[in-house]
Image: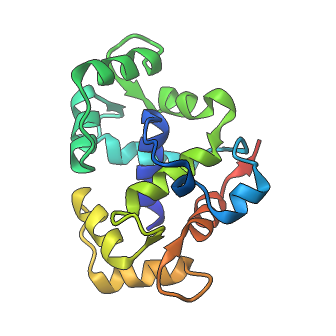
């Protein structure tokens, strides 16, 4: 689940517009802790795996078409104008593509990856909105991304993250998984 969840996580960072009711965005620990501005530096190896998912033709750069294809696979509709704005902001050398260096720069801006970005990624996996991610939800999201994964494999992925043993991934468990290899800023 790590690579694909990280892909979805990075998508949410670049989009930054998945806002739902505030009570759903935060776990009880986050509400008490109020460290929602905590930031993490992205791990370069994991970022390369995410970049490679976007770069479907493996030419070392992400085109607007490749970016749109990932968004469509995730069921996220973007207007041409939104994608154009994203590329204008991220494409530092003006060649019309996002290369790995530009991709890394995007994710280092604003002090790194914010806790709220991770929470928004969680909401994308929580398809039924119950505050937990099931193996079935993991399988459905992976399927949308073109990843083949059996339900049993998805159950194993969930078990690897499920600290409380309820067979689901809650916000706290997701947060721990997503920040395990990241360094606080």
Query: Along the line of sight, which residue is nearer the eye, 62 or 15?
Result: 15
Q: Residue furthest top?
A: 94
Whether residue 46 appears in this view of the structure is no
Where the N terminus falls, by quadrant? Answer: bottom left
Whether residue 159 appears in this view of the structure is yes
| Picture residue at 42% right of the left edge, 34% below the top | 15
Q: Percent from the top left, x then y, of residue 71? A: 27, 41
Q: Percent from the top left, x then y, of residue 2? A: 48, 64
93 to 104, vertically: above or below: above
154 to 81, vertically: above or below: below
| Picture residue at 62% right of the left edge, 32% below the top | 108
Query: Along the line of sight, which residue is nearer the eye, 30 or 89?
Result: 30
Instruction: Tell me the colour scheme of the image.
Output: rainbow
109 to 126, vertically: above or below: above
Q: Percent from the top left, x then y, of residue 105? A: 57, 28
83 to 136, vertically: above or below: above
Query: Along the line of sight, which residue is nearer the eye, 45 or 163?
Result: 163
Q: What number of labels is visible?
A: 0
| Picture residue at 39% right of the left edge, 26% below the top | 98
| Picture residue at 55% right of the left edge, 80% below the top | 162
Q: Percent from the top left, x then y, of residue 141? A: 30, 62
Where the C terminus falls, by quadrant? Answer: top right
Q: Quadrant of residue 5?
A: bottom left
């Amino acid at each position: 689940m790590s690579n694909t969840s990280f892909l979805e996580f990075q998508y949410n960072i670049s989009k930054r517009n998945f806002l739902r009711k505030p009570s759903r965005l935060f776990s009880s620990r986050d509400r008490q802790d109020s460290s929602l501005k905590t930031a993490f530096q992205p791990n370069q190896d994991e970022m390369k795996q995410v970049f490679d998912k976007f770069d479907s033709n493996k030419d070392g750069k992400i085109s607007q078409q490749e970016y749109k294809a990932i968004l469509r696979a995730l069921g996220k509709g973007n207007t041409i104008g939104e994608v154009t704005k994203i590329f204008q902001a991220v494409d530092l050398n003006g060649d019309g593509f996002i290369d790995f260096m530009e991709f890394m720069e995007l994710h280092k801006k604003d002090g790194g990856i914010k806790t709220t970005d991770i929470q928004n990624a969680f909401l994308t996996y929580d398809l039924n909105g119950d505050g937990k991610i099931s193996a079935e939800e993991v399988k459905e999201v992976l399927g949308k991304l073109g990843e083949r994964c059996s339900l049993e494999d998805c159950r194993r992925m969930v078990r690897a993250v499920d600290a409380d043993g309820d067979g689901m991934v809650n916000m706290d468990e997701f947060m721990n998984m997503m920040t395990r290899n990241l360094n606080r800023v």
